[in-house]
Amino acid sequence: MTNIGTKIYSGKAKDIYSTNNEYEVIVKFRDDITAGDGERKDNFQGKGKYNSLISSKLFEILEESNINTQYIKLIENCSILSKNLKMIPLEVICRNIATGSLLKKFPFEKAQKLKVPIIQMDYKNDEYHDPMLNDDIAIALKIATQDELNQIRTITLKINKILSEFLKEKGILLVDFKLEFGKDLKENIVLGDEISPDTCRFWNIETLKTLDKDSFRQGQNQNEVMSIYQQVCTMIVDENDLKKWKI
């Protein structure tokens, strides 16, 4: 039996707890929601539950395709038992369609479909507001080696292909998404964090309607945002699991 221990990390929307097994942690999803580098904050009841279920399902899909993730199992509807990783301070963003900050920084057309995915890496550091970096900066800061950066890119592109195909079958277009990676005790690169409407841009494949946290960024109210998160959950998660967790 896994026992929850002390809180060892608190992020913008998740807490990490130790367990009675040093190789495992519990990732607890909170109902907090933020935007604008944390400048706008709120708390929407049910958000943590939806994100934990969505993340669990997408991690399971990746595990079935031989992507090494920190996911072990969903232990309740807001908490995931996970491998204990030493996280790499990178936010790895994969873009399939031009939108969001890409339009503010570069002359892409709105909703332009990219011929090949763009992989962008940002330095995960609140003090410096997560700036974009290149390989030379990452290596100079000793964040990762060139080989590790190459591995991360390769894994990210595989994840993009797997999730894009899976979500397309569910009626969802994977516009872009953010990943985080860590290292296990054997120094293997392992996918961590979460994959949810908080970290991805999902569009309805037919209407191109927003199905993610952009709804909060755009000023929609709690009921509207939570309706979207619930919709994504019911589109992605298996029916038996929806019943089990009373969705």
Image: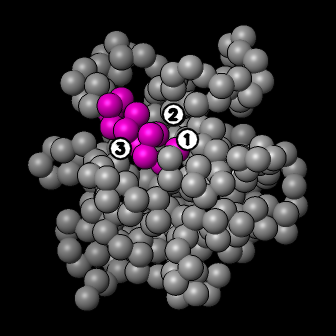
13 lies left or right of 84: right
Q: Tell me the colour scheme of the image.
A: one colour
* Nearer to us: label 1 or label 3: 1
Q: Amino acid at mark 2?
A: Ile
Q: Earlier in the sequence, mark 2 or mark 3?
A: 2
Look at the numbered disc 2 and give the secondary structure of its residue.
strand
Q: Quadrant of the N terminus?
A: bottom left
Q: Position of residue 47 (x, y in %)?
A: 66, 68
Label 3: which residue?
181
Disc 3 residue type (three-letter): Phe
Q: In the depicted view, which residue is nearer to us: 168 or 106?
A: 168
Label 2 – label 3 distance at C-alpha? 12 Å
Does residue 165 sit above or below 233 in this rendering?
Answer: above
> Relative to 99, is 13 above or below?
below
What is the spatial separation of the Cα atoms under label 1 and label 2, in whole angstroms?
6 Å
Task: Report which residue position mark 2 lands on.
Answer: 93
- Within 10 Å of disc 3 (Cα), the crowding (few <14, some 14-19, many 20+) is many
C-alpha span from label 1 to label 3: 13 Å
Q: Which residues are magenta?
A: 152-164
Residue 103 picture quarter: top right
Disc with the residue nearer the chain's start (1 vs 2):
2
Pointer 1 residue:
177
Instruction: Based on the picture, tell me whether residue 126 belongs to the magenta stretch.
Output: no
Per the image, label 1 sits on a secondary structure element best described as: strand
Residue 106: x and y in percent read: 68, 13
Q: Position of residue 21 (x, y in %)?
A: 20, 74
Residue visible at 64% across and 71% down in the picture: 234
Q: Is residue 166 left or right of residue 215?
A: left
- The quadrant of the picture occupied by the C terminus is bottom right
**Eyeballing the image, is 125 above or below 43?**
above
For the residues bearing labels 1 and 2, Cβ distance under 8 angstroms: yes
**Residue at image coords 71%, 66%:** 231
